[in-house]
Image: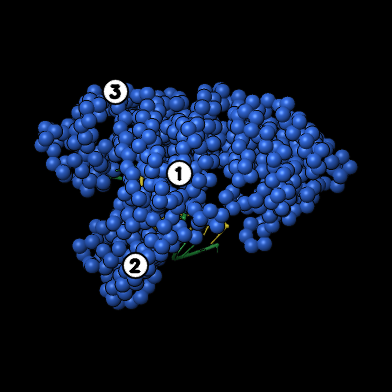
Chain colours: A blue, B yellow, C green
Amino acid sequence: MTEAPAYLDVYPDYEIDEVQPERRKTILTTVHDYRLVDTNELRASLVHFLNQQESFCFDSETTAIDPVEADLVGLSFAYRTGEAFYVPVPPDRAEAQAIVDQFKPVFANPAIEKIGQNLKYDLLMLKKYGVEVQGKLFDTMIAHYLIEPEMRHNMDMMAMTYLNYSPVEIESLIGKKGKGQLTMRDVDIQKVVDYAGEDADITLQLKYTLSPQLEKDNLHKLFDQVEMPLVQVLTDLELEGITIDTSALAELSATLETDMRQVQQEIYAIAGETFNIGSPKQLGEVLFDKLKLDKNAKKTRTGQYATGEEVLSKLEGDNEIVQKILDYRELIKLKNTYVDALPLLISKRDGRIHTSFNQAVASTGRLSSANPNLQNIPIRTPRGREIRKAFVPRGPEFQIMSADYSQIELRIMAAFSGDQTMLEAFNNGVDIHTQTASKVFHVGLDEVTGDMRRKAKTINFGIIYGISSFGLAQRLKIPRKEAAQIIEEYFAGFPAVKDYIDQCIEKARGFGYAETILGRRRYLRDINSRNQTDRMFAERNAVNAPIQGSAADMLKIAMIQIHEFMQTEQLKSKMILTVHDELVFDAHRDEIDYLRERVDHIMKHAIPMAVRMETGIGIGENWLVAH
DNA sequence: GTGAAGCACT
DNA sequence: CTCTGGGTGCTTCACC
């Protein structure tokens, strides 16, 4: 933070906007009243005033970014522009608890709306101190995510964009990140009052800006009825966490290590030298300069040889080294990304792994998972599947239950397009890939071969992603003309799908955005671009976004309804993960039959559609067998 | 520290 | 004739 100009020291709250309109406002140039609330009397008084509000904004200061590991350092509150209150929370757990308890009733008051930036973080912190936040929520981060899905949603950026205000930088208090960075606990209290007070004040002001915008874009229902209730659901999922069988992973790690060393030596033997197999640069030189596996080897735009899986697979027959490199890559990937990494992320507090679900990243409306990402745990290869076995129930009385939507995106495509053949297939329980193969290859349903079905599956995926003959040709490894022919046959067999795709693009051209069944938007600013590549990318998104996004809408509603009934009925079972079309539960044995029935029904009817939704539900001793 | 390459999932 | 499947997050290398 820069020093205030000398003349401002005389009038610290002097408004200089009119003098220097080009300059952003800061805490030094803005009238504000941020107060320290550090006695029982002051806290009681604050609680009294908070209880009289229809809504208030709050923010928590903590010792760490990770909410599961962090301790509370303080809470700030704001309910009128320019005013805020900061309540320090001491390190002593009992003293801290006593202070937090004073605010428990006001947080639990269902009549008061709670405003904040990234509220899931604050809700997690408060839950650790036994505080249940009730009432309507308004998360400014998620409000902005609905309004501008592709933009960033951090408070600093929003303050500058919407309030022309530049907030106090956290680094001016705790230093640059890395070793030696302080925690908020170490900072001079007056500075924290300013920082935390400003945070609550600015977030409150952002709410005043974003709320009317949600109304204007017709996003308020989606916000109030889906995204805000979902914040509470995700808070519980994250806090719950999942149990990992560490001894299984340790065993697997040793096996992978042995196999990896073996393959590594074999690769060195064939290459006639040792080199870093993990370096695409060195690998490319060995494969294409030394072994001359492909004299027309393609290079990436940075001038290196391309050595991705696609490229290597084509060379598999040419030299044994290629298969070994692919094996080596798999072993290294599994070991470094999952087997060795996951145990390090087990919380000392409860021995479980707590992912973080991000509700404001994916521009289609999907959730994402990080630290660790539990939405990309392997399942495809035999070795990868071993990792899933390590995701286990919390104890002997529990089992893992996995419930997923069957073909959710193709069903949504059928419902949106109204294609009769597709709808009938789904509603009569006909396998959709077989149905597609029958139409495309002009054979009866009972004459579809395995290979025809496999091709049809690729076509169906292509349709959802916004198909092109080139892309399909590449996927199926067939000539482009043949792919174009197949697409033509597909559209002849499912004419309403063709019309629907055209309508999606047409609509996006008119509105400038695509939208989901719940009105979630994705802006497609290149939809009318003269640049063909950009325009075609936008057109694919015009088709994909409503489908992928509506699937996300449906799962979110199912999650909210499932969470609601599980809470009302105080089940011992817990929802613990979500993976785009799948929900995972740590299910108590006594509740499994009931849970299965309720989850199945809720998922199938979360959003009424002109197509039957199907689910697949599995139960077992680990995530692999349940899925 | 940052971008590219590569790859795990849906 | 050109270009091209949607959406994520993590690890490593290579370079600054």
On the question of residue A164 being in view, the answer is no
How dense is the environment of label 1, judged by Cα within 10 Å: few (below 14), some, or many (20 and up)? Answer: many
Count residues near mark 2 (Cα–Cα under 10 Å), then give few for <14, some for 14-19, many for 20+. Answer: few
Is residue A592 rendered to the left or right of residue A316?
right
Instruction: Give the alpha-carbon distance from disc 1 to disc 3, as whole Å.
Output: 35 Å
Q: How many numbered marks, from 0 up?
A: 3
Is residue A525 positioned above or below A381 on the image?
above
Q: Which residue in the structure is indicated by mark 2?
A: A255
In the foreground, A388 or A609: A388
Pointer 3 or 2: first along the chain: 2
Q: Which of marks 1 and 3 is in front?
A: 1
Indicate the position of residue A553 as horizontal and vertical percent values: 43, 31
Horizontal relation, residue A212 to residue A326: left or right: right
Q: How far apart are marks 3 and 2 (CA)?
A: 51 Å
Q: Earlier in the sequence, mark 2 or mark 1?
A: 2
Chain-order first, disc 1 or disc 3 = 3
Q: In this view, does A7 lie above or below A562?
A: below
Q: Mark 1 points at which residue?
A: A576
The tag on residue A418 is 3
